[in-house]
Image (spheres, rainbow, N blue to C red):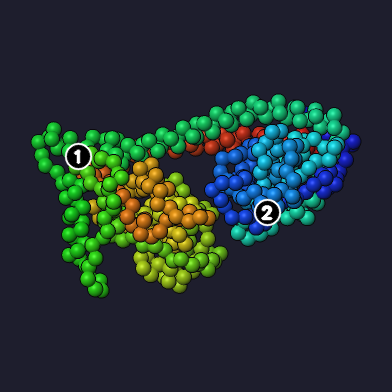
Amino acid sequence: MVASSPIWEARSLREVVTKLVDGSHNPPPKQDTGLPMLSARNIDRGQVLFDDYRLISESAFASENARTRIAPGDVLLTIVGTIGRTAVVPEGSQPFSLQRSVAVLTPSANLLPKFLCYQLESPAIQKHFEANARGTAQKGVYLKTLGQTPVVLPPVDLQREIVAELEKQFSRLDEAVANLQRVKANLKRYKASVLKAAVEGRLVETEATLARREGRTFETGEQLLQRILVERRAKWAGKGKYLEPEATNVSDLGELPEGWIWASAVQACQQVVDCHNKTAPYKSTGIPLVRTTNIKDGRLILEDTRFVDQPTYEFWSRRCPPEPGDVLFTREAPMGEAGIIPPGVKLCLGQRTMLMRPSAAISSSFLLSALLSPVVKDLIDRVAVGSGVKHMRVGDVERLPVPLPPVAEQARIVAEVDRHLSIIREVEVEVDANLQRAQALRQATLSKAFAAT
């Protein structure tokens, strides 16, 4: 790598660019047709990604473009949320506008766009962004602060030499990272196929097949559901007349194996409760508050959580205090995630989370597999509503279809799912460790390249 040199000039970012603007602070309404408006999520791995964005009208685009004037060779920098990702606008790119989470920088004639990108991603400048980001919900770097970012400016020939060396080293590293990302994608597909097979009765031998071979009878899913509903009706002690739980619409659902039946979530569960619809007052210590972001990939992630005090917990949980074994479900942002409350954990549930307490004869783990399976996920996407942030209505969650096999078959399915998922988790841990090593190597390489900073 090229060593630092006294001829590297120390400048501020404002001094080495001819344009420094950010995207729209008030994005126009979404449309079904129009021109793309991208955000920080569209800037990743050094590329401008056109895979998930809003469309805005031509008139709104013209207004936005008059300010940002995005052109090939401009450098894009994410400045809200995940700060510090960069990309160079390529030649021949389709026209697009930006939300406030991305800044547009036009390098001066003596600054190569790629050199600027690599420098902005270097550890020294990333630490500068981190130290100067402001905000509560989402951290961001304001344009005045961004313009004061310290950079170095070597001669153009030296910039070319540094960029060439970095790209030579990163090409091998990027290939390795791409292979690891493909492994992660394959693991995700493998997991989905396991869950799909589990709820379609293809993962283990069915109870009906075993019973025939062994010459015995068994309680079918239909009989199990009827037993659950009869017991619930008999135990009713609430106010007013008992209302039968609403069934799900099975007309669009596939065939189930012999001995299985479709049930709605509200039929399969003792309780399906929507949590409080207001933001809980947070504390620095106390009872963990589970938000939608704490529920991911079938697990509760409590390493980064907020807390509430006991009075808040009692008020927020008055309808149904969460218990170990309850299944938590997100009905908005991100939608359709689920996880089980583990033993020995006391939690308070925040906005947009729902609690499902399975009936005694239904396995929490099987219910979780059903909710996370492609069969139910596809339906969730179809019933979601909202023009901005997609969400599910409480009634739609209550009517989510749950395939119900016999009790013994549930246990065998759960054991087989756990076996497959444990293998997936082991490989994921190794893949993530290698991705972290690759990122550390990339940062070390950038640090060496820009040692003059």
The residue depicted at 38 percent of the width and 35 percent of the height is 193
Residue 68 at x, y percent in the picture: 73, 48
Marks 1/2: CA distance? 56 Å
Where is the N terminus found, in terms of image quarters? top right
Q: Is residue 94 above or below residue 315?
A: above
Q: Which amino acid does the dot numbered 1 rest on?
A: Glu
Q: Which residue is mark 1?
A: 258
The residue depicted at 28 percent of the width and 47 percent of the height is 251
Residue 89 at x, y percent in the picture: 70, 38
Q: Is residue 101 above or below residue 93?
A: below
Q: Can you tell which of label 1 and label 2 is closer to the viewer?
A: 2
Q: Which amino acid does the dot numbered 2 rest on?
A: Ser
Q: Which residue is mark 2?
A: 24
Residue 359 at x, y percent in the picture: 26, 56
Is 225 displayed left or right of 308 in the figure? left
> What secondary structure is marked by label 2?
loop
Is 331 displayed left or right of 212 in the figure? right
Disc assigned to residue 385: none
Q: Residues within 10 Å of mark 2 (few under 14, many from 20)?
A: many
In front here: 423 or 279? 279
In front here: 218 or 387? 387
